[in-house]
Image (cartoon, coloured by chain):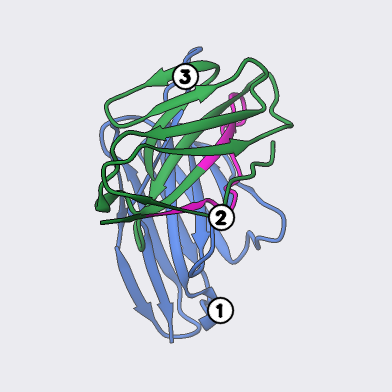
Amino acid sequence: GAVVSQHPSWVICKSGTSVKIECRSLDFQATTMFWYRQFPKQSLMLMATSNEGSKATYEQGVEKDKFLINHASLTLSTLTVTSAHPEDSSFYICSAREGGGGSLQTQYFGPGTRLTVL
Amino acid sequence: LAKTTQPISMDSYEGQEVNITCSHNNIATNDYITWYQQFPSQGPRFIIQGYKTKVTNEVASLFIPADRKSSTLSLPRVSLSDTAVYYCLVVNTNAGKSTFGDGTTLTVKP
């Protein structure tokens, strides 16, 4: 299957700083990528849909000014957590959608980024 | 987006076939079904997807009845390494996005 990478795999930062997480589709182009957050023992929660060349669409309750998403190319989307606080500590996972043109599209997920805010 | 309902947990033994059923009563015409496997501290891994009837690949089979209000993931001869959380997703063809349900925690015992 298609491969999606994330960088970094883990990050520890101080409260008040900003952290950028990169999501790349390595062997396919993705016009649409998704960002999820997962807390321990819970399911994945969709944060936003990232579309190449346009503004991201955020789910209800997700602060767009706090979680900045940029999808500048067909293989790269970035999530920046601005002014991070301890409650933002979580496992952030991206996915990229492959396929189209009448066929079923498949979402492939990255390995995730563990963010710890001190 | 159609809501999905799965059993919270299931136990099985090595070598057995495991069937996990997902209910999605409000599935729409443009929706299809995808199953993922997730291990702790890892991103979900794609298993299989389908629109109707039966789909089979090298690791699993997916059964979807004619009314498409449910689907069943079948894992043949599970091993200890199949212990994981399994998610059933209903994905809209146009929007592409989907909502994760609570998933099914499968525990395979020796």
| SS category of the residue bearing label 2 | loop
Label 1: chain letter:
A
Q: Residues within 10 Å of mark 1 (few under 14, many from 20)?
A: few
Answer above or below: position of A24 versus B73: below
Q: Nearer the viewer, residue A46 or A56?
A: A46
Where residue B26 sits, quadrant-wise, is top right
- Chain with colour green in the figure: B
Indicate the amino acid at tag 2.
Ile
Label 3: chain letter:
A
- Quadrant in the picture for the C terminus of chain B: bottom left
Identify the residue position indicated by label 1 in the image.
Answer: A87
- Quadrant in the picture for the N terminus of chain B: top right
Indicate the position of residue B85 as horizontal and vertical percent values. Answer: 43, 53
Q: Mark 1 near mark 3, Cβ–Cβ under 8 Å?
A: no
Residues shaded magenta: B88-107
Q: Name the residue: 33% across, 73% down.
A: A11
Q: Name the residue: 64% across, 22% down.
A: B68
Q: Nearer the viewer, residue B55 or A112?
A: B55
| SS category of the residue bearing label 1 | helix
Q: Which color is chain A depicted in? A: blue
Q: Evaluate whether label 1 is on the same chain as label 2.
A: no
Question: Magenta segment: does it hold A27?
Answer: no
In space, the residues marked 1 and 3 are separated at their CA atoms by 37 Å
Indicate the position of residue B50 as horizontal and vertical percent values. Answer: 49, 22
Identify the residue position indicated by label 3 in the image.
Answer: A100
Label 2: chain letter:
B
Identify the residue position indicated by label 2 in the image.
Answer: B8
Label 2 vs label 3, nearer the camera: 2
Answer above or below: position of A84 versus A1: below
Question: Magenta segment: does it hold B105?
Answer: yes
Indicate the amino acid at tag 3.
Gly
